[in-house]
Image: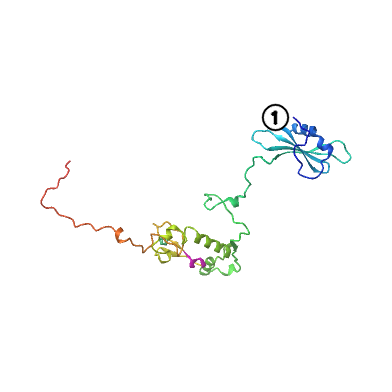
């Protein structure tokens, strides 16, 4: 099973230590002390790792590990003739089946992924947030003053930063609640003139409001003033679509009505 020829071209220009390169049997025996003989395939070659350090590679034939290689590293001490085993590991080869590159969960999570009980803490240095300083809080104990402080965001550990506000505004404007949405494109009028639009506070109120029409798709959502939908408070049906008036009722006082009798 062993093949003393080096079938794998060393990737480094370093010349392999002769004693280490020839010690295929030593590497193979050390490997069989750790894994089943049936898991070890042919010798694939050796790689010079450093001065008097050589790694021998053996094919891994264990089911499910196609393309993986047993890697046995041998070391020869200075002025010694024999080698010793330094490390045995299983490594993926070029055509090994590997899982996709791991992506941190924070980069994987998408809007709408949160389920009840999940936690999604904001990073300490989240650029969408800035500290909401509470300096002098002890002096603002009157209810009315506290209300103003709360509205301004003071009293909260962090508040929306300019960047966070701009990102949100752009996201809302570009999304399905902005002017480009299909609903808005065919709306009879804009949200800005709709009686169901309720106002926001702060800078975002210059562009957005909240729809409060129970029959509208955007009920309870932030909409831009130039968004719109067919449930606009002033929408009117065209004459053709309006219900036709019913004819006058006819009173028949001559014939008998046929009624079911039980
Ligand atoms: S009902 Fe339609 S037009 Fe009126 S605010 Fe809501 S989304 Fe805008």
Q: Residue placed at 59% from the left, 68% from the top?
A: 138
> Residue drawn 60% across and 69% down?
136
> Which corner quadrant of the image does residue 22 belong to?
top right
Rendered view: 223 above or below 107: below
Q: How is the image coloured?
A: rainbow
Dot 1: within a 10 Å radius of its alpha carbon, few (fewer than 14), some, or many (20 or more) residues? few
Q: Is residue 9 left or right of residue 104?
A: right
Tell me where residue 193 appears, x and y as whole percent.
Answer: 41, 66
The boundaries of the magenta stretch are 203-208
Quadrant of the drawing holding the C terminus: top left
Asked whether residue 59 is drawn in magenta, I would say: no
Q: Quadrant of residue 6?
A: top right
Provide the residue designation for mark 1: 38
Estimate the x, y position of residue 160 in percent, counting from the top left.
56, 63
> Does the magenta portion include 204?
yes
Q: Quadrant of the N terminus?
A: top right
Q: Residue at the right extreme?
A: 79
Which of these two is toward me, 234 or 45? 45
Residue at the far left: name it: 254
Element assignment for label 1? helix
């Amino acid at each position: 099973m062993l093949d003393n020829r080096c079938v794998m071209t060393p990737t480094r220009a370093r010349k392999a230590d002769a004693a280490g390169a020839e010690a295929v049997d030593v590497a193979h025996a050390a490997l069989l002390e750790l894994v089943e003989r049936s898991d070890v395939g042919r010798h694939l070659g050796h790689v010079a790792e450093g001065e008097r350090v050589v790694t021998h590679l053996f094919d891994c034939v264990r089911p499910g590990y196609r393309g993986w290689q047993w890697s046995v590293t041998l070391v020869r001490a200075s002025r010694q003739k024999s080698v010793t085993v330094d490390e045995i590991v299983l490594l993926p080869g070029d055509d090994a089946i590997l899982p996709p590159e791991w992506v941190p969960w924070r980069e994987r999570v998408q809007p709408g992924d949160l389920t009840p009980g999940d936690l999604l803490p904001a990073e300490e240095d989240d650029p969408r947030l800035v500290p909401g300083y509470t300096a002098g809080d002890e002096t603002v104990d009157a209810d009315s003053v506290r209300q103003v402080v709360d509205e301004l965001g003071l009293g909260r550990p962090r508040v929306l930063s300019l960047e966070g506000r701009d990102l949100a505004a752009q996201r809302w404007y570009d999304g399905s609640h902005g002017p480009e949405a299909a609903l808005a494109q065919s709306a009879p009028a804009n949200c800005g003139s709709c009686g169901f639009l309720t106002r926001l506070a702060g800078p975002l109120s210059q562009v957005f409001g909240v729809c409060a029409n129970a029959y509208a798709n955007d009920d309870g959502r932030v909409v831009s003033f130039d968004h719109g939908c067919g449930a606009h408070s002033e929408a009117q049906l065209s004459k053709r679509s309006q219900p036709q008036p019913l004819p006058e009722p006819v009173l028949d006082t001559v014939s008998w009505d046929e009624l079911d009798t039980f």
